[in-house]
Every structure is written in C-alpha cells, then in structure tokens.
Image (tube, rainbow, N blue to C red):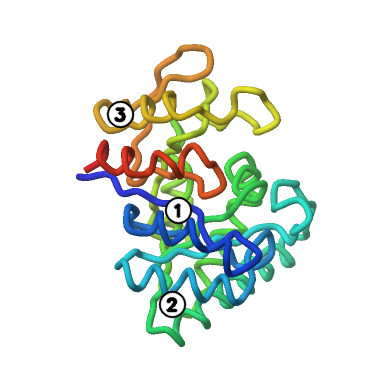
Amino acid sequence: MRLLLNCDLGEGSDVDATYHDEQVMPFIDQVNIACGMHAGNPVVMKKTLISARSNGVTVGAHPSYPDRDGFGRRSMELPVEELIAVVQYQIAALQGMAKNLGVQVRYVKPHGALYNDMMAHSRIRNAVMQAISENCETLEFMLQATPFADEHKKEADLFGLDVIFEAFADRCYDDRGALVARTEHDAVHNREKMLRQVKQLVEHGTVTTRSGTCIELRADSICVHGDNVAAIEAIAEVRTLIT
C-alpha cells in the first residue's frame, strides 16, 4: 500500500503566513490543521480548510497543550478531565469551521509536547484517545509508528478508534523508536538526510537511528513538518519518492 504524505499547517498568525501552506497543499494527502491553542487563528484556519478543499486533501485536527507562547512545545501537567476537554474543544473548533465550508475532519493528530508526552505516557495517551472517542463523529487517531505499535493499536481498539501510524521525514530517531528531542543538535535532519530517510522508509520500512541501528517502522503516512523550511522546500522531491 502506498504511503501517504501529511503536513502540519495552519500554524501562521496572519493571512500572509498561509502563502507557503498553499504551495505545499498540492503535494500532500493529509493536512494537520492547528486549532488555535499553539498557533493559528480563525482566519488562518478557514483559509487552510479552503485550500485543503480545493486540493482534495484529507483534513485532520492538530490540537495541543494551551501554550501559544511556547508553540505547544512545553509539557504541561493538566488533570485528565481538563486535558480531555482541551482536546475536545480544539477538535470542535475545527469541525465547526469545516462544516461551514463543506469539509469533513477525518482524524486527530496531537501537536508538539502533547504528542511526545502521549507517546511516552499511557495515561496521557488514553486521555487523548478518550477525547477523540467521545466526539459526535467518527475520527481516526494519528500517532507515531514505533516498535510498540501493536500495543498502541490494542489500546486504540478499546476506545473503538482506527489508527493511522506515521513516520517522520525530517526527524532523527533514537534506538527505542522515539524522536530525538528538538533541544538536541541533531534532532532535525537537513534536506539530504531527510530525503535519504524517506527513501529508506519507502523501500525498506525502516529508519536508521542516531546510533546507526536500523529499526522497523510500519507506517501508513509520512510527516513533513510545516515549520521546517528545508522540508517545505523539498516537498516535491518527497512526493516523488513516495509515489
């Protein structure tokens, strides 16, 4: 089955910031749209939805911790009840805007620190899954493909959620299959390394970790980050590699 290509977009703060989003949209299959708590705003959200509709791109909600100052990259200790509500609030915001435009939100992919915390802690992961499962519409759950994918799939099954496993084009992995923290100097690949990693994922379903170990990742989709300039500039080449 062909790998899909997804990208985090709608993260600008003004209308002009959507220009590069519109340049990227024709090359991707899935767009993860910021819901306002780490980035974006109603105008940017609307323009990104319209662009997705025009290009036939599947829409997903991209909720985060309520952390605009830190771009959602700082962990927050929220009670489970509050975390569930925060995620549901963001999904609902995007869904409401999308319905007005005749667009359907199909899945949810958490952002930044929430994503990383979710992958590391079952309590947070289960809270996110509960938030998604209680939605009035059926939504899929996008999370990281790791060596623990079977375990995560069983957890999602308990909440009645279908899973989309993703791998990352531009991020370095450690030997556990986790992403190297952005605070590390080699966390984000340059263009050459990114394209090499995409090719390896497509041809072998593996990535080479920071230590040189080869690990298997069973992914359905590959993510190219919308805030990584090198990745955006190479989007056409990435598209060619996975087609």
Which residue is at the far bottom?
100
Q: Is residue 243 left or right of residue 200?
A: left
- Classify mark 1: helix, strand or loop: strand
Q: Label 3 sits on what residue type?
A: Lys
Q: Is residue 14 left or right of residue 74?
A: left
Label 2 – label 1 distance at C-alpha: 16 Å
Q: Earlier in the sequence, mark 3 or mark 2?
A: 2
In this view of the protein, which residue sits in the foreground, 41 or 122?
A: 41
x, y percentage for residue 102?
38, 84
- Classify mark 2: helix, strand or loop: loop
Tag 3 residue: 199
Q: Residues within 10 Å of mark 1 (few under 14, many from 20)?
A: many
Q: Is residue 8 left or right of residue 51?
A: right
If the image is split into quadrants, where does the C terminus sit? Answer: top left
x, y percentage for residue 29?
32, 56
Tag 2 residue: 137
Residue at image point 66% right, 61% down: 39
Residue at image point 60% right, 48% down: 115
Answer above or below: position of 168 versus 196: below
Q: Nearer the viewer, mark 3 or mark 2?
A: 3
Tag 1 residue: 142
Quarter-of-image position of residue 185: top right
Q: Residues within 10 Å of mark 2 (few under 14, many from 20)?
A: few
Q: Earlier in the sequence, mark 3 or mark 1?
A: 1
Say whether marks 2 and 1 touch (CB < 8 Å). no
Q: Label 1 sits on what residue type?
A: Met
x, y percentage for residue 149?
42, 39
Answer above or below: position of 134 versus 37: below
In this view of the protein, which residue sits in the foreground, 184 or 206?
A: 184
Q: Is residue 182 left or right of residue 195?
A: right
- Classify mark 3: helix, strand or loop: helix
Answer above or below: position of 57 versus 226: below
